[in-house]
Amino acid sequence: MAAISRKKVNSLIPEGSIEGYERPAVTVDVLIFTIDNNRLKVALIRRGIPPFKGSWALPGGFVHIDESLEEAARREIEEEAGVSDVFLEQLFTFGDPRRDPRTRVITVAYYALVPFDRIALQAATDATEASWFDVDDVPPLAFDHAQILQTAVERLKGKLEYSNVAYALLPLRFRLSELQNVYEVILGQQMDKRNFRKKIISLGVVEPTGKIDSSGAHRPAQLFRFKTHKMVFIK
Amino acid sequence: MAAISRKKVNSLIPEGSIEGYERPAVTVDVLIFTIDNNRLKVALIRRGIPPFKGSWALPGGFVHIDESLEEAARREIEEEAGVSDVFLEQLFTFGDPRRDPRTRVITVAYYALVPFDRIALQAATDATEASWFDVDDVPPLAFDHAQILQTAVERLKGKLEYSNVAYALLPLRFRLSELQNVYEVILGQQMDKRNFRKKIISLGVVEPTGKIDSSGAHRPAQLFRFKTHKMVFIK
DNA sequence: TGAATAGTGTCTTTCAGACAATATGCC
DNA sequence: GGCATATTGTCTGAAAGACACTATTCA
């Protein structure tokens, strides 16, 4: 095979100095998802200043010079939703030169999954400045945030099908019908109960806890747990 | 459901000004893959200046203030490998505060796939400053580039299994045995010829061209093509 | 005719999907 | 008893995987 052209071999440090280039601003934006009331919800904030003043937007902020990208994302999530130790994964980096009208801003998007029982811990109630929205019923969003949301939902659908991420949206113990609901809500399609249970059990990702959930005016259900709370690929 | 805490709702523009934060440098690094001699190869360059002077590294460079991330990556690929219109996908953004000893540098990694017949178009031959390496036999790499390479190879394996990306590593027309070789080399396992052909044909992603490849001292082979040269998910 | 690769079919097992009736607890 | 949800098994079709021999060309 022919070798590679030698042009620009030193381009990592061009024009003599690392200071030779104008630096963009770098932010993280986070998509905080939860499932509530049989709907996939995302947390949005209302912007108080221009540009897009008054618009809804993803929570986000600048990456501090001494923190990693993931640290910045976790910081935002704790500030916004008051939760830590959530599932967090880098989604994509959006860097169109004109995505922010003020200046060049590159944003690294992360998505987080939070079980609905942990969200309930949040006390503040001020629906005019930060709120949960149905992912397929969001208001017009600032910047390219609608595109970021769409990318995130697609990623989440994919992950659900070939990994155990659903653990991150459920409490420690859950009924199999709750697990099925996570799949139905995110994938947007009904599933056959018998086939779903057969499949999940045969995958070996969950196990019965021995506990019983006797709430509700109907037959009690066995509670299951995920064998691991680390994301692993299945199939 | 309770609403979200209102703390830091305006954190996108904190401390009064978008200039309030020190900006990191932003680079793109590219992994240019090809298959040659039954091996998956990646293009590396040798660094001519500190840090890591003399080390091998991924090609990369600063993102110009007025170009998108993907434009920056394509520019690097054209400069390095002399090819354009290659398959290119964003891999991941690496932003550990200490990944570059000089200053804060956030790098957006992209990977590109190039058919081996297009690489052959490259004329220059200077193996001391830029060269192709077997992905599982690379020299020690600068910065966190070994980690980036590992991430890229994992992604490539995944993509191969549930998409038609293999088109991007093959010439327009190819023998089914060449296609099988792409899978075997990247996934690192031998496959049964009959089952492979049955599978590929039944997926409907390739079609015979009617042409015959009569090179070689053996029975000639039919040449196939991918029906589409856009990445699509299969299965 | 020997070397090298192309091309092809069957059997078995596994997985996916369609489908309905009974069980249990609360009111 | 009525309501609501939990729990369970069979059949069928499709796909995956194991497996070996013949065909064609060139040297």
Image (spheres, coloured by chain):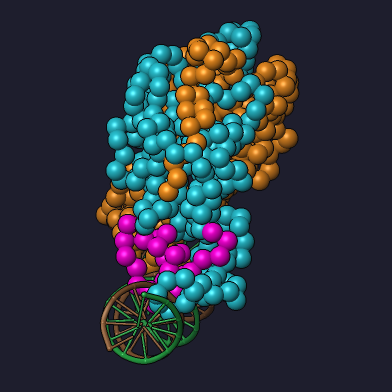
Chain colours: A orange, B cyan, C brown, D green
Q: Is residue C1 above or below residue A44?
A: below
Q: Which image quadrant: the C terminus of chain A?
A: bottom left
Q: Position of residue B140 (x, y in %)?
A: 29, 32
Q: Nearer the viewer, residue B59 or A32?
A: B59
Count of number-bearing discs: 0
Residue B187, relative to residue A34: is it above or below?
below
Residue at (70% x, 18% y) in the render? A102
Do we see residue A94 in this rendering?
Answer: no
Residue A149 forms part of the magenta stretch:
no
Queried whether the magenta region covers residue B190, the answer comes back as yes
| Residue A104 in sight | yes
- Residue B208, given in percent of the width and then of the height, sits at 57, 74
> Which quadrant of the view contains residue A55?
top right
Q: Main secondary structure of the magenta part?
A: helix
Q: Which of these two is toward me, D1 or B30? A: B30
Residue B58 at x, y percent in the picture: 42, 33
Query: Residue A68 at what x, y percent from top left?
Result: 42, 22
Residue at 50% from the left image edge and 24% from the top image edge: A11
Would you say A48 lies left or right of B50 here?
Answer: right
Q: Residue at x 50, y 12 (%)?
A: A17
Q: Residue at x 62, y 34 (%)?
A: B71
- Frontmost residue, A17 versus A81: A17
Judge left or right: residue B17 versus residue A205.
Answer: right
Chain part drawn in magenta: B171-199
Q: Is residue A223 above or below residue B140?
A: below
Query: Looking at this view, is B124 or A205 the one in front?
Result: B124
